[in-house]
Image: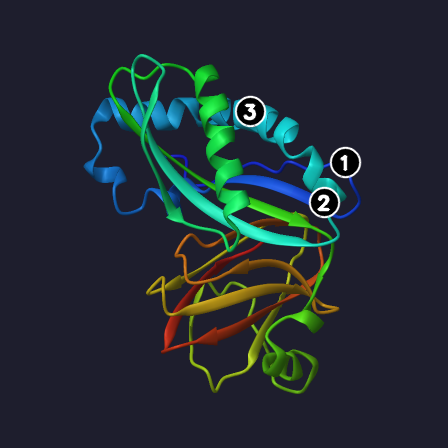
Amino acid sequence: MLKLILGLMILAAGANADIEVKMNTKALYREIFEKLSDQQQNYINDNMDTIKDQTNNVLRAESKDLQKAKMIDESNAVEFILNPDGTMSNFKYLMKSDENRYDGLSKRVCEAAVKKYPLPKEPTPIRMVFEYKVGKMNLGSQRGSEQQKANGEYIQTIPRGTTRFNYSADQQIRQFETTKDGFVNANLNPPTCGWIDLLTEQNEKVRSLTYTGYGIYQGVPKGKYKLLMQTKETCNVNIQYP
């Protein structure tokens, strides 16, 4: 059975430094998984933990210099074919970052890490999301007009047990409370209809979902959180939280 959620958190040594590889299998493979062969599906299910561990080791070594930066908030998503001889082919970006240096770093990490992956029996697509985050991202530097809503009376509570709701631009910011430490999983349908910021109760940004379709999958401690959203159209928002 497909492991729906696979996440890897790599915490850098510097203060407020978070260099992360995400493998949300449900989101990343959602449109292609059923089209893969049984051998390809089995490889993804059986070896993703090992792939994450090996990528973790390489990324940690390659990203040391980034920990010295004052502020980074970049991400990209990649796909490549892992061949039975251990080589990588057909590398491409599913989503590019705003700066080429982070795209290049993600590619170098994959090129080095792939040599340590288990060998598949047939060429198999591998997808990953790289996130480079250093320093605290405060709402004060984000989405200027929307900040007033997050700080004001426009907040609406998401009822406990809700897993889906509709959102349009004229509606309120949504807030919710987790009952224990765990993971928040949020995505939009259609995937390109807008963006979401996951915020703390104090309006510090925890994670963003922009026009990518890969969703938010973020480990959080017990507490209160907000979804700050802006949409181009009416969206269906899917959310799960502990």
Residue 57 seen anywhere in this rendered image of the structure: yes
Give the residue displayed 72% in from the left and 68% down from the top. 201
- Tag nearer the camera, 3 or 2: 2
Instruction: Give the image's coloring scheme.
Output: rainbow
- Tag nearer the camera, 3 or 1: 1
Q: Is residue 128 above or below residue 237?
A: above
Mark 1 neighbour class, 10 Å CA radius: few under 14, some 14 to 19, many 20 or more = few
Instruction: Give the amino acid at mark 3.
Output: Asp
Quarter occupied by residue 68:
top right
Callout 3: SS: helix
Callout 2: SS: strand
Q: Earlier in the sequence, mark 3 or mark 1?
A: 1
Name the residue tied to disc 3. 53
Residue 1 seen anywhere in this rendered image of the structure: no
Instruction: Give the amino acid at mark 1.
Output: Ala
Give the residue displayed 49% in from the left and 52% down from the top. 97
Is the C-beta separation of discs 2 and 1 under 8 Å?
yes
Name the residue tied to disc 2. 17
